[in-house]
Image (spheres, rainbow, N blue to C red):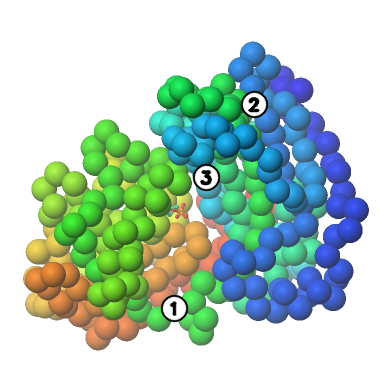
Amino acid sequence: MTSGGRETFLFETHPSPMAASEREALLQNPGFGRVLTDHMATIRYSEGRGWHDAKIEPRKAFELSPSTVVLHYAQEIFEGMKAYRLPDGGATLFRPDANARRFTNSANRLAMAPLPEDLFVESVRALVRTDRDWIPAAEGASLYLRPFMIATEAILGVKPSSDYLYCVIASPVGSYFKGGAPAVTLWVSENYTRAAPGGTGEAKCGGNYAASLAAQAEATREGCDQVVFLDAVEKRWIEELGGMNVFFVFEDGSLQTPPLTGTILPGITRDSLITLARDLGLTVREEPYSIDQWQADAESGRLTEAFACGTAAVVTPIGKVKGRTRNFTIGDGGAGPVAARLKATLLDIQNGRAPDRHGWLDRLF
Ligand SMILES: *Cc1c(COP(=O)(O)O)cnc(C)c1O
């Protein structure tokens, strides 16, 4: 029962969890998002009753009416975060309060019932503690957590749903890119935009991803790894990738990243890297940067590196940029030293190898 966001989780242990030997074999090479743990967290909402029925239960399929709102009108939001192994065998979350706050903001934008933030954090903690044996220990590996919420009212009329299901699933993941981070090639999309002013660009919702897939397919056809989106109004300012924010590094050692003006997803990795770069004495500007300027600076050598960042892939160097009328290389086309240093600084904190000066870790056990 809800009382100011305080809810007791009912624990229903899996009657037949995966055998330890099978689990250990999967943890050797989990890939990304293929393998799920034994349990899931769920909490239900209904109008009048509020949030109730918080559970850690065996992971199982949902049963939904074919008229369920989420299936027709895409009223859905999600989060992405990780639990990390610590050198002493313990485990930690990284800034879960920031994910909780962003989940509230996304819920408000999609006209969904906001989940109390302490309940969000508690659900993630409870699931990771239950499935603690699933956190991989290999370098670069972690337990990826996917909290999400769907509209569950069964009605075809268009309106915000009266019922919601919140759920957290967990997936052990290896390094996003095997053998370190190779530099990626970006495709500058001219046919598609990701987010317009007043749209859902700063909400983490499945609909944004559905809308980005045709652009991603175009990038793949053009032999590129990822799309970089320009702003929807002037088609000139760099915004972000389909699921990662972007940074630029200049020869004077300063960094720049597009400002959060409503059409860009406010990444927690982005925010953390800004803080860490400033801790290292680097200048960071949150200012618009145009695609033409990017090309000119890459060609003149004023720009020395560019990289993408997000929870899943951490820091990914950008080596080349292609478009209908452009094709340029950044630096020598490989990984640069500033990106490498920031990545190592962040990973050292997340894995408990460096002091947590900003109070970002939420130790679980
Ligand atoms: C999740 C996401 C990011 C990265 O956010 P993090 O909190 O750093 O993981 C960036 N862009 C988009 C569109 C996203 O959905």
Q: Which numbered tag is attached to residue 45?
A: 2
Q: State yes or no: discs 1 and 2 in contact (Cβ < 8 Å).
A: no
Q: Quadrant of residue 66?
A: top right
Specify few, some or many for label 3: CA neighbours under 10 Å numbering under 14, 14-19, or 20 or more: many
Cα gap from disc 1 to disc 3, whole angstroms: 26 Å
Amino acid under disc 3:
Phe
Dot 1 corresponds to which residue? 181
Query: Is residue 86 shown left or right of residue 33?
Result: right
Residue 299 spot, x, y in % from top left: 11, 78
Q: For the residue marked with disc 1, what is the amino acid?
A: Ala
Whether residue 158 can be seen here: yes
Q: Quick check: 73 left or right of 33?
A: left
Mark 2: amino acid: Tyr
- Distance Cα–Cα, label 2 vs label 3: 16 Å
Mark 1 or mark 3: name the one nearer the start of the chain.
3
| Image quadrant where one finds the N terminus | top right
- Callout 1: helix, strand or loop? loop
Q: Which residue is label 3 attached to?
A: 78
Q: Secondary structure at mark 2?
A: strand
